[in-house]
Image (tube, rainbow, N blue to C red):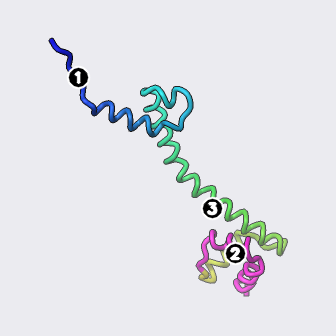
């Protein structure tokens, strides 16, 4: 019986997985089983960390706004500022407020003073 040459489909699949794991170290980039495990793990981490990145940036913005607000007045704090923003129907999100706080502090002080009145 003659030898049957296998097709290219499995090789193509493994090559595609290897290309994904080419940046990994050691056996994680050389052995097929380990590569597939690491690929699953990497994609799960990426999915989890996309949500975590949003959380981390929100925390950063809140910290920056709070630092600038407390620098101006000791009694005024972040929670009151946000509450007054909503009460005054001034729709500025935290990202924009943090950018204003970094680039132009006087503008943030003016916004907070207008809200209080």
> As rendered, which of 95 and 81 lies closer to the eye?
95
Horizontal arrangement in the rendering, residue 112 relative to residue 9 (left or right): right
Report the quarter where the N terminus lies.
Answer: top left
The residue wearing badge 3 is: 58
Q: Which residue is drawn at 51% across and 46% down?
A: 46
Which label's residue is closer to the chain start, 1 or 3?
A: 1
Labelled pair 1, 3 in contact (Cβ < 8 Å): no
Mainly helix, strand or loop, the magenta region? helix
The residue wearing badge 2 is: 100
The picture quadrant where one finds residue 99 is: bottom right
Q: Give the distance between the C-alpha atoms of the residues marked 2 and 1, in whole angstroms.
A: 66 Å
Residue 11, x across and y down, in percent = 33, 31
Q: Does the magenta stretch include residue 78?
A: no
Q: Is mark 2 on a helix, strand or loop?
A: helix
Residue 81, x across and y down, in percent = 70, 74
Q: Is mark 1 on a helix, strand or loop?
A: loop
Mark 2 or 1: in front is: 1
Q: Give the distance between the C-alpha atoms of the residues marked 3 and 2, in whole angstroms.
A: 15 Å
Which label's residue is closer to the chain start, 3 or 2?
A: 3
The residue wearing badge 1 is: 5
Q: Residue at x 46, y 31 (%)?
A: 35
Magenta residues span: 91-117
């Amino acid at each position: 019986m003659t030898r049957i040459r296998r097709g290219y489909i499995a090789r193509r699949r493994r090559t595609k997985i290897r290309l994904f794991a080419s940046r990994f170290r050691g056996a994680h980039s050389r052995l097929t089983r380990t590569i597939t495990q690491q690929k699953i793990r990497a994609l799960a981490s990426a999915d989890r960390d996309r949500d975590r990145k949003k959380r981390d940036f929100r925390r950063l913005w809140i910290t920056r706004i709070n630092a600038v607000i407390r620098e101006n007045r000791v009694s005024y704090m972040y929670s009151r500022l946000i509450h007054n923003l909503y009460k005054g129907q001034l729709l500025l999100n935290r990202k924009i407020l943090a950018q204003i706080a970094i680039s132009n502090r006087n503008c943030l002080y003016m916004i907070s003073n207008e809200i209080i009145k």
